[in-house]
Amino acid sequence: MNMLRLQALVRKEFQQFIKDKRLLPIIFVLPILQLTFLGFAASLDVKNIVFVLADMDKSSESREFIRSFTNSGYFTMGYTTEDYNTVRTYLDNSQATMAVIIPPQFGAKVLRRESVDVQVIFDGSEGNSTAIASGYAMQIINRYSQEVLTEIVGDVRRLGGVTTETRAWYNPTLVSRVFMVPGVLVLILLITTTNLTAMAIVKEKEIGTLEQLLVTPLRPIELIVGKLIPFTIIGLIIVTVALLVMVFGFGIPVRGSLLLLYAFNGAFLMTSLGLGLFVSTISKTQQQAMMVGMFFVMMPMMYISGFVFPVENMPVALQWVSHAIPMKYYLVAIRSIILKGAGLSELWFEGVMLVVMGIAVLAASVLRFREKID
Amino acid sequence: MNAIEVRGLTKRFGQFTAVDHIDFDVKQGEIFGFLGANGAGKSTTIRMLCGLLSSTEGTARVGGFDINTDPHSVKQSIGYMSQKFSLYEDLTVEENIDFFGRVYGITESALKERKAWVLDIANLHGREKSITGTLSGGWKQRLALGCAVLHRPRIVFLDEPTSGVDPVMRRKFWELINELSADGVTVLVTTHFLEEAEYCNDIILINAGKIIASGSPKELKRDHIKHPILEVHCSDVVRAMERIEEEPWAVETSIFGTTIHVNVENEQQGRDAITSLLHRNGITVNGIERITPSLEDVFIYLLEHGGGKG
Ligand SMILES: Nc1ncnc2c1ncn2[C@@H]1O[C@H](COP(=O)(O)OP(=O)(O)OP(=O)(O)O)[C@@H](O)[C@H]1O
Ligand SMILES: [Mg+2]
């Protein structure tokens, strides 16, 4: 790679950016609008919520109670523990999104028709799932208490029953927006950068300037990196605008390290821009690039990453596919950093995945780049 | 050594053969003209020689480098001006020059001097900050030529550099091409204007992907025009041409502006035949004279007779 040639390319891109009247709205207006609209987006359906059970009673009544959860079709018992404190570990590691804690004497109290407190705890950083799951949990518990009590005394109204106390950690107010906004931020970054880069090379192909570039000593890697650098900077500006709207417009603070957040932004940009450039190198026309970018990059990223449908709701096959979707890792990382204040020790795996995929995609673009025009 | 050597070069797009086994040599420092009608295969050939298109068959050496096995070395030694304007229309004149200069690795100090030269030849001094897209055709073309030779390549490919350029500008353009050639640069140029072909040292004429004639302008006229050409000045040119064309003694007939050129077997018999034919048809003959053939006569003759059409 020749640095002077690379520098010439990057400088040229910026000279073009400055003169492009559409770029300013894309960088500043679009993120603000999208964030405002999508930030208030509706909640979504949830299935197969994995929960951890701490049954400190172990009576036939407590087992019956749990069965009403597992039979509902919404909940899967992933883990059991004896200890109130270990519950936290399961939630922290995102192994479970919900914990059900049954106190000692549960069965006895139910039989004595006294009221019992069952604790249901949610991982609030999975906001949209949490809100829905807690709704389901309430319903199930209400129904259970009605059934039990009806069985015993025939009349519910006069008596106490099982009451639940739900708590959401990490997202105490349980506003779905708090959960949605970081996701939307990710989406904005995905859409704008993929769109811009998918056009980048094919546009030069269409207007004919690529033909002039290809007779110069420029190498494919210089061309790809020369496009990558300016678009990374644009992507970082977009994400900064979106973050400012999030913090000051929605009042959602970044709990974790800003440095780590930007490191992940950078890593994700490498893959999303890389995919855009790849699309651009294989397309013949801008139209084609737009379609390919839409169907093969943006749609999978949106639908299989956990942005629209939680990954745990997907068919198993799609869950497997989701492992290959960079946005899944980025989404987890961004939400964890912003909402939980997670650090690199919790997110190193996501980081490694993003970097590896980024390098792979860029390498593919360089290799696939044709130095001929036929 | 020849600057360019082409052997059996062929390009097929699917079933269609755009360039069909062509061979030619271009000598160092000459102006080599590449002529042919629309779709003859000129641009396709040039693109293969620049390493932009892969060849289906055959080889070529440009500046001593094989276009198939060493396209990068080819690119280092050539300059290319494509038929379609392909500088950045959204950049300024200066930004375009700077960009291509830097991509070719010209040092900043040398670039300053080369930039002044390009602005000179393109007559764009004072318009460095103009957006390239706003320039008119002739200026754009000269800027494109400047950018193509910015890095002082030894071989330059110019694909219809004078299309869309007015006659005065065109003359200037050819002065530039001559200067390049005088400096020892080999210039391969395609054109639609047959009078421009007269400025070339050597020419090839291609039709439907095949070479149908080659040589210097002088050789072409000597070798291919065996018949005398009569220029007929008369009243109803179109009708006159239609009548003459039907006659067996008219080898070749074509309209040149307000006159008709007729190739005949024998000068005197031809004069008599034309006069009496047009007279019978009520067309006034104002004069008939024998002319020395132009390249245009040669090419029209070749395209109608000599050249195998595919
Ligand atoms: N990429 C391509 N795919 C298919 N056919 C092509 C392609 N490029 C050129 N052709 C065809 O090859 C033939 C030769 O084209 P070429 O551009 O070389 O002609 P040309 O001599 O340069 O003509 P012009 O004077 O119009 O520029 C034309 O019939 C053209 O349609
Ligand atoms: Mg052409």
Image (spheres, coloured by chain):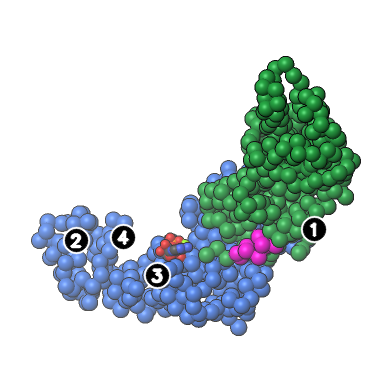
Real-space Cα distance between discs 3 and 1?
Answer: 51 Å
Quadrant for the N terminus of chain A in the image: bottom right
Real-space Cα distance between discs 1 and 4?
Answer: 52 Å
What residue is shown at x 67% (from left), y 43% (from top)? A48
Give the left or right position of residue A33, taking residue B211 as reference. right
Residue wearing tag 3: B15
Check if residue A367 falls in the magenta segment: yes
In the picture, the disc for residue B109 is: 1
**Label 4 beta carbon less than 8 Å to ligand 1:** no
What residue is shown at x 50% (from left), y 60% (from top)? B160
Chain holding disc 2: B
Q: Which residue lies furthest to the bottom in this view?
A: B1
Within 10 angstroms of label 1, few (less than 14), some, or many (20 or more) residues?
few
Q: Do the residues under discs 2 and 1 have CB atoms within 8 angstroms?
A: no
Q: Give the residue type that dot 1 points to.
A: Ser
Residue wearing tag 4: B256
Q: Do the residues under discs 1 and 4 have CB atoms within 8 angstroms?
A: no
Residue wearing tag 2: B242
Identify the hue of chain B.
blue
Q: Residue furthest left?
A: B280
Q: Nearer the viewer, mark 1 or mark 4?
A: 1
Q: Give the residue type that dot 3 points to.
A: Gln
Identify the hue of chain A.
green
The magenta region covers A362-371
Chain holding disc 4: B
**Label 1 beta carbon less than 8 Å to ligand 2:** no
What residue is shown at x 73% (from left), y 36% (from top)? A65
Give the overall secondary structure of the magenta segment: helix
